[in-house]
Amino acid sequence: MSSMNYDLLARQLVSLLDTRDWLTNATQTVALIKQEIADLNWVGFYLHRKPRSLILGPFQGLPACNPIAFEHGVCGAAATTRQTQRVDDVQAFPGHIVCDVSSRSELVVPLISDERLWGVMDLDSPRPARFSDADQAGIERLGACFMSASDLSGSAIGFD
């Protein structure tokens, strides 16, 4: 597995996020990640706009499952626990939601604003065990760049 330069990627992302508009920034974020990080088949956001549910936001990849209840899947687990979920084999994950049968591993980062869940950033890979500790830390950093650059008012309700 090649070593991704997340410092460089974070600098590139910050330069792309030249607006406070969360929708533009979310779109730019997923486009950059999908373009620059190898072995991904889906990258996107799910927003917390309804109680205990995630609604599809900007993404790149095949059409996606929507909505996702907190009780289901890797995204639901990240939303419920507010902790990053890194799954080496999604087929072994209890309650995994199959949106793309080629996805084998997944990394989901919860995005928190003012102590409220704004949503999650979801990355899928067709390669088992695709995501390392360094990938997790790097993607968490990119999520933080997105959150700090964006005006999130009005973008999600943030039920808790």
Image: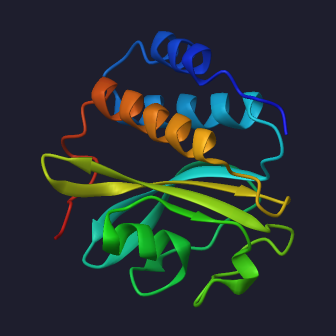
Report whether 71 appears left or right of 135: left
Report whether 92 appears left or right of 68: right
- Residue shown at 60% from the left, 20% from the top: 9
Image quarter of the N terminus: top right
Q: How many marks?
A: 0
- Residue shown at 66% from the left, 48% from the top: 132
Res 151 → quadrant: top left
Outermost residue toward the left? 114
- Residue shown at 79% from the left, 68% from the top: 104
Image quarter of the C terminus: bottom left
Res 83 → quadrant: bottom left
Report whether 85 appears left or right of 145: right
Pick the residue in front: 57 or 92: 92
- State whether residue 37 is above or below residue 112: above
- Residue 7 lies, in percent from the top left, at 55, 17
Report whether 128 appears left or right of 160: right
- State whether residue 98 is above or below residue 145: below
- Residue shown at 60% from the left, 39% from the top: 134
- Residue 12 lies, in percent from the top left, at 57, 13
- State whether residue 60 is above or below residue 151: below
- Residue 93 lies, in percent from the top left, at 63, 83
